[in-house]
Amino acid sequence: MPSVVYALLQDLEVDDGMRVLDVGTGTGETAGALTHRLGPRNVTTIEVDESVSARARERLRRLSLQPEVIVGDGFEGHRGRAPYDRVLATVALRQLPMAWVRQTRPGGLILAPWGTVYGNVDAVVRLTVEGDSATGPFTRPVEFMKFRAQRGSPLPHTDYLSAGPLQDADETTSSLTEEEFVTGRFTDLPFVLGLRLPRCRHAVADKREGARPVWFYSLADMSWACVLFHDGDRARVWQWGPRRLWDEAVRAYEWWRDRGSPGLHRFGLTVSSSGQRVWLDNPSAESWPLDVSPA
Protein backbone atom coordinates (compact mmCIF):
# COMPACT_ATOMS: atom_id res chain seq x y z
CA MET A 1 0.00 0.00 0.00
CA PRO A 2 2.74 2.63 0.72
CA SER A 3 3.95 2.48 -2.89
CA VAL A 4 0.38 2.96 -4.17
CA VAL A 5 -0.18 5.94 -1.85
CA TYR A 6 3.14 7.42 -2.95
CA ALA A 7 2.07 7.13 -6.59
CA LEU A 8 -1.25 8.82 -5.80
CA LEU A 9 0.52 11.68 -4.07
CA GLN A 10 2.78 12.12 -7.09
CA ASP A 11 -0.26 12.20 -9.39
CA LEU A 12 -1.86 14.82 -7.13
CA GLU A 13 0.83 17.39 -8.07
CA VAL A 14 0.47 19.58 -4.99
CA ASP A 15 2.25 22.91 -4.71
CA ASP A 16 2.92 25.38 -1.91
CA GLY A 17 -0.20 26.97 -0.48
CA MET A 18 -2.66 24.47 -1.92
CA ARG A 19 -5.61 23.25 0.18
CA VAL A 20 -6.28 19.50 0.07
CA LEU A 21 -9.22 17.37 1.22
CA ASP A 22 -8.15 13.80 2.03
CA VAL A 23 -11.13 11.42 2.03
CA GLY A 24 -10.63 8.22 4.02
CA THR A 25 -8.16 9.02 6.81
CA GLY A 26 -7.37 5.39 7.60
CA THR A 27 -3.99 5.19 9.33
CA GLY A 28 -3.35 8.87 8.67
CA GLU A 29 -0.40 8.08 6.38
CA THR A 30 -1.69 10.15 3.45
CA ALA A 31 -2.80 13.06 5.62
CA GLY A 32 0.59 13.01 7.34
CA ALA A 33 2.53 13.17 4.09
CA LEU A 34 0.34 16.02 2.84
CA THR A 35 0.67 17.93 6.12
CA HIS A 36 4.45 17.56 6.04
CA ARG A 37 4.42 19.05 2.54
CA LEU A 38 1.72 21.73 2.84
CA GLY A 39 1.33 22.51 6.55
CA PRO A 40 -1.57 21.81 8.92
CA ARG A 41 -3.74 24.74 7.80
CA ASN A 42 -3.93 23.39 4.27
CA VAL A 43 -4.90 19.75 4.92
CA THR A 44 -8.30 18.42 5.98
CA THR A 45 -8.84 14.68 6.34
CA ILE A 46 -12.22 13.03 6.90
CA GLU A 47 -13.05 9.55 8.16
CA VAL A 48 -16.47 7.98 8.81
CA ASP A 49 -15.27 5.64 11.58
CA GLU A 50 -14.76 7.55 14.84
CA SER A 51 -12.36 5.01 16.35
CA VAL A 52 -10.22 4.90 13.19
CA SER A 53 -10.15 8.69 13.13
CA ALA A 54 -9.11 8.88 16.79
CA ARG A 55 -6.21 6.45 16.27
CA ALA A 56 -5.03 8.38 13.22
CA ARG A 57 -5.24 11.70 15.07
CA GLU A 58 -3.11 10.32 17.91
CA ARG A 59 -0.60 8.81 15.50
CA LEU A 60 -0.28 12.14 13.69
CA ARG A 61 0.03 14.04 17.00
CA ARG A 62 2.98 11.85 18.02
CA LEU A 63 4.66 12.87 14.76
CA SER A 64 3.92 16.56 15.49
CA LEU A 65 1.55 16.69 12.53
CA GLN A 66 -1.82 18.32 13.12
CA PRO A 67 -4.03 18.52 10.05
CA GLU A 68 -7.74 19.12 10.53
CA VAL A 69 -9.14 15.64 11.30
CA ILE A 70 -12.90 15.35 10.80
CA VAL A 71 -15.29 12.51 11.65
CA GLY A 72 -18.02 12.45 9.03
CA ASP A 73 -19.34 11.16 5.74
CA GLY A 74 -16.59 11.71 3.20
CA PHE A 75 -19.12 11.41 0.38
CA GLU A 76 -20.41 14.84 1.44
CA GLY A 77 -16.91 16.31 1.53
CA HIS A 78 -16.26 19.09 4.03
CA ARG A 79 -17.31 22.65 3.28
CA GLY A 80 -15.36 24.20 6.15
CA ARG A 81 -12.17 24.82 4.18
CA ALA A 82 -13.58 24.69 0.66
CA PRO A 83 -12.83 25.42 -2.07
CA TYR A 84 -10.00 22.92 -2.29
CA ASP A 85 -7.23 22.80 -4.85
CA ARG A 86 -7.10 19.04 -4.61
CA VAL A 87 -9.41 16.26 -3.40
CA LEU A 88 -7.81 12.85 -2.84
CA ALA A 89 -9.72 9.67 -1.98
CA THR A 90 -8.04 6.52 -0.71
CA VAL A 91 -11.26 4.52 -0.79
CA ALA A 92 -12.71 3.17 -4.03
CA LEU A 93 -15.95 4.59 -5.39
CA ARG A 94 -18.66 3.45 -7.76
CA GLN A 95 -20.31 6.87 -7.92
CA LEU A 96 -18.24 10.03 -7.54
CA PRO A 97 -20.10 12.67 -5.50
CA MET A 98 -21.02 16.08 -6.87
CA ALA A 99 -20.17 17.52 -3.43
CA TRP A 100 -16.48 17.05 -4.26
CA VAL A 101 -16.90 18.80 -7.59
CA ARG A 102 -18.69 21.75 -5.97
CA GLN A 103 -16.05 21.99 -3.22
CA THR A 104 -13.12 22.07 -5.65
CA ARG A 105 -12.01 25.29 -7.29
CA PRO A 106 -12.15 25.59 -11.11
CA GLY A 107 -9.06 23.94 -12.52
CA GLY A 108 -8.57 21.90 -9.35
CA LEU A 109 -8.04 18.15 -9.36
CA ILE A 110 -9.97 15.22 -7.92
CA LEU A 111 -8.04 11.96 -7.70
CA ALA A 112 -9.88 8.78 -6.69
CA PRO A 113 -9.99 5.02 -7.24
CA TRP A 114 -13.12 4.32 -9.28
CA GLY A 115 -14.66 1.22 -10.74
CA THR A 116 -17.77 -0.79 -11.49
CA VAL A 117 -19.41 -3.73 -9.75
CA TYR A 118 -18.05 -6.10 -12.42
CA GLY A 119 -14.97 -6.89 -10.33
CA ASN A 120 -12.85 -5.75 -7.40
CA VAL A 121 -10.05 -4.02 -9.31
CA ASP A 122 -10.54 -0.32 -9.96
CA ALA A 123 -8.60 2.43 -11.73
CA VAL A 124 -7.42 5.80 -10.51
CA VAL A 125 -9.32 8.60 -12.24
CA ARG A 126 -7.76 12.09 -12.43
CA LEU A 127 -10.52 14.65 -12.89
CA THR A 128 -10.14 18.36 -13.61
CA VAL A 129 -13.02 20.50 -12.38
CA GLU A 130 -14.59 22.71 -15.02
CA GLY A 131 -17.62 24.69 -13.85
CA ASP A 132 -20.25 22.29 -12.53
CA SER A 133 -18.58 19.14 -13.88
CA ALA A 134 -15.27 17.29 -13.72
CA THR A 135 -13.60 15.20 -16.41
CA GLY A 136 -10.38 13.31 -16.90
CA PRO A 137 -8.62 10.04 -17.74
CA PHE A 138 -8.03 6.81 -15.88
CA THR A 139 -4.35 6.45 -15.05
CA ARG A 140 -3.52 3.14 -13.35
CA PRO A 141 -5.18 -0.01 -11.97
CA VAL A 142 -5.51 -0.23 -8.19
CA GLU A 143 -7.41 -2.15 -5.55
CA PHE A 144 -8.68 -0.28 -2.49
CA MET A 145 -11.30 -0.93 0.14
CA LYS A 146 -14.67 0.14 -1.23
CA PHE A 147 -16.56 3.17 0.07
CA ARG A 148 -18.89 1.83 2.78
CA ALA A 149 -22.12 3.25 1.40
CA GLN A 150 -21.37 1.85 -2.07
CA ARG A 151 -20.30 -1.70 -1.24
CA GLY A 152 -23.75 -3.21 -1.67
CA SER A 153 -24.77 -6.69 -0.60
CA PRO A 154 -24.65 -9.02 -3.61
CA LEU A 155 -26.79 -12.11 -3.46
CA PRO A 156 -24.98 -15.43 -3.02
CA HIS A 157 -24.41 -17.77 -5.95
CA THR A 158 -26.94 -20.27 -4.56
CA ASP A 159 -29.77 -17.71 -4.72
CA TYR A 160 -29.28 -17.32 -8.46
CA LEU A 161 -29.26 -21.08 -9.06
CA SER A 162 -32.35 -21.44 -6.87
CA ALA A 163 -34.19 -18.91 -9.04
CA GLY A 164 -32.94 -20.46 -12.26
CA PRO A 165 -31.66 -24.04 -11.88
CA LEU A 166 -28.88 -25.22 -14.20
CA GLN A 167 -31.16 -27.76 -15.88
CA ASP A 168 -33.53 -24.94 -16.91
CA ALA A 169 -30.79 -22.79 -18.46
CA ASP A 170 -30.23 -22.43 -22.21
CA GLU A 171 -27.04 -24.25 -23.22
CA THR A 172 -24.86 -23.26 -26.18
CA THR A 173 -21.16 -23.11 -27.03
CA SER A 174 -18.77 -20.26 -27.74
CA SER A 175 -15.67 -19.86 -29.89
CA LEU A 176 -14.17 -17.31 -27.51
CA THR A 177 -11.21 -18.88 -25.72
CA GLU A 178 -9.98 -18.73 -22.15
CA GLU A 179 -6.74 -17.09 -23.32
CA GLU A 180 -8.73 -14.30 -24.96
CA PHE A 181 -11.20 -13.69 -22.15
CA VAL A 182 -9.45 -14.53 -18.86
CA THR A 183 -6.53 -12.11 -18.88
CA GLY A 184 -5.79 -11.52 -15.19
CA ARG A 185 -7.12 -9.21 -12.49
CA PHE A 186 -4.94 -6.17 -13.16
CA THR A 187 -5.11 -6.26 -16.95
CA ASP A 188 -7.16 -3.86 -19.06
CA LEU A 189 -9.91 -6.21 -20.26
CA PRO A 190 -11.82 -6.83 -16.98
CA PHE A 191 -11.94 -3.10 -16.29
CA VAL A 192 -13.19 -2.33 -19.81
CA LEU A 193 -15.81 -5.09 -19.66
CA GLY A 194 -17.12 -3.49 -16.48
CA LEU A 195 -17.59 -0.24 -18.41
CA ARG A 196 -19.67 -2.05 -21.04
CA LEU A 197 -21.63 -4.46 -18.82
CA PRO A 198 -23.89 -2.41 -16.52
CA ARG A 199 -25.02 -3.87 -13.22
CA CYS A 200 -23.23 -7.17 -13.70
CA ARG A 201 -20.63 -8.82 -11.50
CA HIS A 202 -18.46 -11.75 -12.45
CA ALA A 203 -16.36 -14.39 -10.73
CA VAL A 204 -13.48 -16.36 -12.25
CA ALA A 205 -13.11 -19.76 -10.61
CA ASP A 206 -9.90 -21.75 -10.20
CA LYS A 207 -8.86 -23.98 -13.07
CA ARG A 208 -9.10 -27.70 -12.35
CA GLU A 209 -8.36 -30.62 -14.66
CA GLY A 210 -8.21 -28.29 -17.66
CA ALA A 211 -11.57 -26.62 -16.96
CA ARG A 212 -12.28 -23.10 -15.74
CA PRO A 213 -15.80 -21.72 -15.13
CA VAL A 214 -16.54 -18.00 -15.22
CA TRP A 215 -19.84 -16.85 -13.70
CA PHE A 216 -21.87 -13.70 -14.40
CA TYR A 217 -24.63 -12.35 -12.15
CA SER A 218 -27.09 -9.57 -12.95
CA LEU A 219 -27.75 -7.01 -10.23
CA ALA A 220 -30.87 -5.82 -12.04
CA ASP A 221 -32.68 -9.18 -11.81
CA MET A 222 -31.84 -12.83 -11.16
CA SER A 223 -30.28 -13.51 -14.56
CA TRP A 224 -27.04 -15.46 -14.57
CA ALA A 225 -24.64 -17.06 -17.02
CA CYS A 226 -21.73 -19.47 -16.84
CA VAL A 227 -19.06 -20.12 -19.45
CA LEU A 228 -16.95 -23.24 -18.96
CA PHE A 229 -13.62 -23.03 -20.73
CA HIS A 230 -11.98 -26.40 -21.27
CA ASP A 231 -8.58 -27.06 -22.81
CA GLY A 232 -8.91 -28.33 -26.34
CA ASP A 233 -12.71 -27.85 -26.63
CA ARG A 234 -15.14 -25.09 -27.44
CA ALA A 235 -16.43 -23.34 -24.36
CA ARG A 236 -19.81 -24.49 -23.04
CA VAL A 237 -22.25 -21.75 -22.05
CA TRP A 238 -25.35 -21.74 -19.83
CA GLN A 239 -27.62 -18.70 -19.56
CA TRP A 240 -30.78 -18.12 -17.55
CA GLY A 241 -33.09 -15.14 -17.12
CA PRO A 242 -34.18 -12.15 -19.22
CA ARG A 243 -30.60 -10.90 -19.59
CA ARG A 244 -28.27 -12.99 -21.74
CA LEU A 245 -25.17 -12.07 -19.81
CA TRP A 246 -22.68 -14.13 -21.78
CA ASP A 247 -24.04 -12.64 -25.01
CA GLU A 248 -23.59 -9.19 -23.46
CA ALA A 249 -20.05 -10.10 -22.43
CA VAL A 250 -19.18 -11.28 -25.94
CA ARG A 251 -20.55 -8.07 -27.46
CA ALA A 252 -18.51 -6.04 -24.97
CA TYR A 253 -15.39 -8.04 -25.80
CA GLU A 254 -15.93 -7.59 -29.55
CA TRP A 255 -16.52 -3.85 -29.06
CA TRP A 256 -13.15 -3.62 -27.27
CA ARG A 257 -11.33 -5.77 -29.85
CA ASP A 258 -12.80 -3.85 -32.81
CA ARG A 259 -11.33 -0.62 -31.40
CA GLY A 260 -7.85 -2.03 -31.19
CA SER A 261 -8.06 -3.39 -27.63
CA PRO A 262 -7.56 0.02 -25.96
CA GLY A 263 -5.92 0.13 -22.54
CA LEU A 264 -7.62 1.75 -19.56
CA HIS A 265 -5.50 4.91 -19.99
CA ARG A 266 -7.48 5.66 -23.18
CA PHE A 267 -10.74 5.78 -21.21
CA GLY A 268 -11.99 8.59 -19.03
CA LEU A 269 -14.87 9.75 -16.89
CA THR A 270 -17.05 12.85 -16.80
CA VAL A 271 -19.07 13.60 -13.67
CA SER A 272 -21.89 16.15 -13.62
CA SER A 273 -25.27 16.70 -12.01
CA SER A 274 -26.81 14.57 -14.79
CA GLY A 275 -24.71 11.53 -13.85
CA GLN A 276 -21.52 9.80 -14.95
CA ARG A 277 -20.36 9.26 -18.53
CA VAL A 278 -17.46 7.10 -19.61
CA TRP A 279 -15.61 7.99 -22.80
CA LEU A 280 -12.96 6.61 -25.11
CA ASP A 281 -10.04 8.92 -26.07
CA ASN A 282 -11.81 12.22 -25.30
CA PRO A 283 -15.13 13.41 -23.82
CA SER A 284 -16.50 14.61 -27.17
CA ALA A 285 -15.81 11.27 -28.89
CA GLU A 286 -17.54 7.97 -28.16
CA SER A 287 -19.18 8.10 -24.73
CA TRP A 288 -22.05 6.52 -22.81
CA PRO A 289 -23.85 6.90 -19.46
CA LEU A 290 -23.08 4.33 -16.82
CA ASP A 291 -25.14 2.87 -14.00
CA VAL A 292 -22.71 1.50 -11.41
CA SER A 293 -25.21 0.94 -8.59
CA PRO A 294 -23.86 -1.74 -6.22
CA ALA A 295 -27.21 -3.50 -5.90
Image: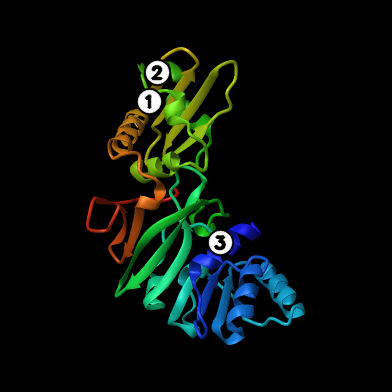
Disc number at residue 109? none
Provide residue 140's location: percent of width, then percent of height: 48, 53
Left or right of 130 on screen, residue 16: right
User: Where does residue 236 sit, x and y in percent of width and height?
Assistant: 42, 17
Outermost residue on the right side: it is 62
Image marks 1 and 2: residues in contact by CB distance under 8 Å: yes
| Residue 226 locus on image (x, y percent) | 44, 25
- The front one of 159 and 185 is 185
Assign a secondary structure to mark 3.
helix
Q: Is residue 211 above or below residue 181?
A: above
Looking at the image, residue 91 lies above or below residue 253: below
* Crowd tier of the residue under label 2, counting other residues whose Cα lies within 10 Å: few below 14, some 14–19, many 20 or above: few
Real-space Cα distance between discs 1 and 2?
A: 7 Å
Q: Amino acid at mark 2?
A: Asp
Q: Amino acid at mark 1?
A: Trp
Closer to us: 120 or 170: 120
The mark that comes first in sequence, 3 or 2, is: 3
Q: CA distance from mark 3 to mark 1?
A: 43 Å
Q: Residue at x 44, y 43 (%)?
A: 188
The amino acid type of the residue labelled 3 equals Ala
Quadrant of the image occupied by residue 51? bottom right
Position above or below: 148 against 81: above
Quadrant of the rendered structure where residue 128 is?
Answer: bottom left
* Label 1, residues with CA under 10 Å away: few <14, some 14-19, many ≥20: many
Residue 168, disc: 2
In which quadrant is the N terminus drawn?
Answer: bottom right
Q: Which residue is mark 1?
A: 240
* Residue at x-position 67% and y-position 82%: 66
Residue 7 is labelled as 3
| 35 sits left or right of 94 in the view | right
At mark 1, the secondary structure is strand
Q: Residue at x 46, y 65 (%)?
A: 111
